[in-house]
Image (tube, rainbow, N blue to C red):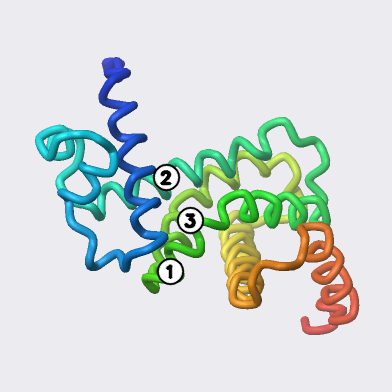
Amino acid sequence: MAFKKKNPMAEKSKKWLTDALLEIMKNKPYNKITIKEISDKALLSRRTFYRNFNSKDEVLSLKMEYICREYISYFSGEQNLSYKNIIHIYFKFWKDHLDFLLALDKSDLLYLMLQKFNEYLPIIYNHFKGHLHLFKNREHLEYALYFSSGGLWNVLLKWIKEGAKKSPEEMESILREALKNANLTTIV
Protein backbone atom coordinates (compact mmCIF):
# COMPACT_ATOMS: atom_id res chain seq x y z
CA MET A 1 0.00 0.00 0.00
CA ALA A 2 1.46 3.35 -1.06
CA PHE A 3 1.75 6.10 1.53
CA LYS A 4 -0.10 9.22 0.46
CA LYS A 5 1.42 12.41 1.83
CA LYS A 6 -1.11 14.84 3.29
CA ASN A 7 -1.19 18.39 2.03
CA PRO A 8 -0.46 20.60 5.08
CA MET A 9 -2.58 23.47 3.74
CA ALA A 10 -5.54 21.16 3.13
CA GLU A 11 -5.18 19.83 6.69
CA LYS A 12 -5.17 23.40 8.04
CA SER A 13 -8.25 24.22 5.98
CA LYS A 14 -10.05 21.17 7.36
CA LYS A 15 -9.16 22.22 10.91
CA TRP A 16 -10.38 25.76 10.30
CA LEU A 17 -13.64 24.47 8.83
CA THR A 18 -14.27 22.09 11.74
CA ASP A 19 -13.52 24.87 14.23
CA ALA A 20 -15.82 27.24 12.34
CA LEU A 21 -18.65 24.72 12.41
CA LEU A 22 -18.30 24.33 16.17
CA GLU A 23 -18.33 28.10 16.70
CA ILE A 24 -21.50 28.46 14.66
CA MET A 25 -23.16 25.48 16.39
CA LYS A 26 -22.78 27.24 19.74
CA ASN A 27 -25.40 29.77 18.64
CA LYS A 28 -27.34 28.13 15.82
CA PRO A 29 -29.00 24.73 15.33
CA TYR A 30 -26.96 22.42 13.13
CA ASN A 31 -29.77 21.87 10.63
CA LYS A 32 -29.94 25.64 9.97
CA ILE A 33 -26.22 26.07 9.26
CA THR A 34 -25.16 26.53 5.64
CA ILE A 35 -21.93 25.73 3.85
CA LYS A 36 -21.53 29.44 3.12
CA GLU A 37 -21.70 30.27 6.83
CA ILE A 38 -19.06 27.66 7.65
CA SER A 39 -16.78 28.87 4.85
CA ASP A 40 -17.22 32.52 5.79
CA LYS A 41 -16.54 31.85 9.47
CA ALA A 42 -13.36 29.93 8.53
CA LEU A 43 -12.38 32.79 6.18
CA LEU A 44 -12.21 30.31 3.30
CA SER A 45 -14.04 30.09 0.00
CA ARG A 46 -16.86 27.65 -0.68
CA ARG A 47 -14.60 26.20 -3.34
CA THR A 48 -12.05 25.35 -0.63
CA PHE A 49 -14.85 23.81 1.42
CA TYR A 50 -15.89 21.54 -1.45
CA ARG A 51 -12.28 20.64 -2.20
CA ASN A 52 -12.13 19.08 1.26
CA PHE A 53 -15.71 18.02 2.05
CA ASN A 54 -18.93 17.04 0.31
CA SER A 55 -21.22 18.21 3.10
CA LYS A 56 -21.33 19.76 6.55
CA ASP A 57 -22.02 16.24 7.87
CA GLU A 58 -18.50 15.29 6.77
CA VAL A 59 -17.12 18.30 8.65
CA LEU A 60 -18.94 17.23 11.80
CA SER A 61 -17.77 13.65 11.37
CA LEU A 62 -14.16 14.79 11.02
CA LYS A 63 -14.46 16.94 14.16
CA MET A 64 -15.66 13.83 16.00
CA GLU A 65 -12.75 11.81 14.61
CA TYR A 66 -10.32 14.45 15.86
CA ILE A 67 -11.90 14.17 19.30
CA CYS A 68 -11.79 10.36 19.32
CA ARG A 69 -8.12 10.37 18.35
CA GLU A 70 -7.37 12.91 21.05
CA TYR A 71 -9.22 10.74 23.59
CA ILE A 72 -7.03 7.78 22.69
CA SER A 73 -3.89 9.90 22.96
CA TYR A 74 -4.99 10.96 26.47
CA PHE A 75 -4.33 7.38 27.53
CA SER A 76 -1.21 6.72 25.46
CA GLY A 77 1.23 7.53 28.25
CA GLU A 78 -1.03 6.46 31.08
CA GLN A 79 0.24 3.57 33.18
CA ASN A 80 -2.56 3.55 35.74
CA LEU A 81 -5.54 2.08 33.91
CA SER A 82 -7.62 1.30 36.96
CA TYR A 83 -11.34 1.88 36.51
CA LYS A 84 -11.07 4.75 39.00
CA ASN A 85 -8.43 6.51 36.93
CA ILE A 86 -10.21 5.81 33.63
CA ILE A 87 -13.36 7.49 35.00
CA HIS A 88 -11.34 10.49 36.17
CA ILE A 89 -9.59 10.85 32.79
CA TYR A 90 -12.89 10.33 30.93
CA PHE A 91 -14.58 13.25 32.69
CA LYS A 92 -11.47 15.43 32.54
CA PHE A 93 -11.32 14.85 28.79
CA TRP A 94 -14.99 15.65 28.22
CA LYS A 95 -14.82 18.70 30.48
CA ASP A 96 -12.12 19.99 28.10
CA HIS A 97 -14.56 19.41 25.21
CA LEU A 98 -17.68 20.63 26.96
CA ASP A 99 -18.34 23.34 24.34
CA PHE A 100 -18.54 20.67 21.66
CA LEU A 101 -20.84 18.45 23.72
CA LEU A 102 -23.13 21.39 24.51
CA ALA A 103 -23.25 22.36 20.83
CA LEU A 104 -24.18 18.79 19.90
CA ASP A 105 -26.78 18.68 22.67
CA LYS A 106 -28.33 21.94 21.50
CA SER A 107 -28.96 20.32 18.09
CA ASP A 108 -29.94 16.89 19.52
CA LEU A 109 -26.84 15.30 17.94
CA LEU A 110 -25.07 13.78 20.94
CA TYR A 111 -25.96 10.31 19.66
CA LEU A 112 -23.62 10.90 16.70
CA MET A 113 -20.67 11.33 19.05
CA LEU A 114 -21.50 8.02 20.74
CA GLN A 115 -21.72 6.32 17.34
CA LYS A 116 -18.32 7.73 16.35
CA PHE A 117 -16.86 6.77 19.72
CA ASN A 118 -18.16 3.22 19.24
CA GLU A 119 -16.36 3.06 15.88
CA TYR A 120 -13.14 3.71 17.81
CA LEU A 121 -13.76 1.02 20.45
CA PRO A 122 -11.54 -1.52 18.62
CA ILE A 123 -8.66 0.98 18.72
CA ILE A 124 -9.37 1.67 22.38
CA TYR A 125 -9.43 -2.09 22.96
CA ASN A 126 -6.01 -2.44 21.34
CA HIS A 127 -4.65 0.18 23.70
CA PHE A 128 -6.11 -1.48 26.80
CA LYS A 129 -5.75 -5.15 25.84
CA GLY A 130 -2.68 -5.62 28.00
CA HIS A 131 -4.82 -4.59 30.96
CA LEU A 132 -7.87 -6.67 30.01
CA HIS A 133 -6.45 -10.13 30.52
CA LEU A 134 -9.46 -11.10 32.67
CA PHE A 135 -11.43 -11.97 29.53
CA LYS A 136 -10.69 -15.30 27.92
CA ASN A 137 -13.33 -14.77 25.24
CA ARG A 138 -12.85 -11.82 22.85
CA GLU A 139 -16.59 -11.58 22.15
CA HIS A 140 -17.30 -11.21 25.87
CA LEU A 141 -14.64 -8.52 26.09
CA GLU A 142 -16.23 -6.59 23.22
CA TYR A 143 -19.63 -6.72 24.91
CA ALA A 144 -18.05 -5.56 28.16
CA LEU A 145 -16.40 -2.62 26.36
CA TYR A 146 -19.71 -1.56 24.81
CA PHE A 147 -21.43 -2.01 28.17
CA SER A 148 -18.87 0.20 29.94
CA SER A 149 -18.84 2.74 27.13
CA GLY A 150 -22.64 3.02 27.13
CA GLY A 151 -22.79 3.33 30.90
CA LEU A 152 -20.14 6.03 31.03
CA TRP A 153 -21.80 7.83 28.12
CA ASN A 154 -25.18 7.91 29.91
CA VAL A 155 -23.56 9.23 33.08
CA LEU A 156 -21.85 11.86 30.92
CA LEU A 157 -25.25 12.86 29.48
CA LYS A 158 -26.68 13.24 33.00
CA TRP A 159 -23.64 15.32 33.96
CA ILE A 160 -24.23 17.57 30.92
CA LYS A 161 -27.97 17.93 31.65
CA GLU A 162 -27.07 19.01 35.21
CA GLY A 163 -24.80 21.74 33.85
CA ALA A 164 -21.49 19.82 34.11
CA LYS A 165 -20.87 21.44 37.49
CA LYS A 166 -19.22 18.48 39.19
CA SER A 167 -15.47 18.13 38.76
CA PRO A 168 -13.88 15.01 37.24
CA GLU A 169 -12.74 14.13 40.77
CA GLU A 170 -16.31 14.35 42.07
CA MET A 171 -17.62 12.24 39.19
CA GLU A 172 -14.94 9.62 39.77
CA SER A 173 -15.88 9.49 43.46
CA ILE A 174 -19.63 9.29 42.74
CA LEU A 175 -19.22 6.45 40.25
CA ARG A 176 -16.75 4.57 42.42
CA GLU A 177 -19.15 4.76 45.35
CA ALA A 178 -22.16 3.84 43.18
CA LEU A 179 -20.39 0.77 41.80
CA LYS A 180 -19.25 -0.24 45.27
CA ASN A 181 -22.77 0.14 46.69
CA ALA A 182 -24.35 -1.67 43.76
CA ASN A 183 -22.01 -4.62 44.31
CA LEU A 184 -22.48 -5.55 40.67
CA THR A 185 -20.98 -8.98 41.16
CA THR A 186 -24.16 -10.08 42.95
CA ILE A 187 -26.16 -9.62 39.74
CA VAL A 188 -24.63 -12.68 38.03
- Residue type, mark 1 in image: Tyr
The tag on residue 111 is 1
- Image quadrant in which the C terminus is located: bottom right
Q: Quadrant of residue 14?
A: top left
Residue behind mark 3: 100
Foreground pick, 83 / 163: 163
The alpha-carbon separation of the residues under discs 2 and 3 comes to 13 Å
Foreground label between 3 and 1: 3
**What is the crowding at mark 3: few (fewer than 14 residues within 10 Å), some, or many (at least 20)?**
many
Give the SS element for disc 1: helix
Foreground label between 2 and 3: 3
- Residue type, mark 3 in image: Phe
Q: Residue at x 70, y 51 (%)?
A: 92
Q: Residue at x 64, y 55 (%)?
A: 95
Residue 1 visible in image:
no
Give the SS element for disc 2: helix
Image coordinates for residue 142, horizontal then vertical, percent: 57, 59
The alpha-carbon separation of the residues under discs 3 and 1 comes to 13 Å
Residue 92 visible in image:
yes
Residue behind mark 2: 65
Q: Quadrant of residue 27?
A: bottom left
Q: Is residue 17 above or below residue 2?
A: below
Q: Is residue 132 left or right of residue 95?
A: right
- Residue type, mark 2 in image: Glu
Q: Residue at x 63, y 68 (%)?
A: 156
Give the SS element for disc 3: helix
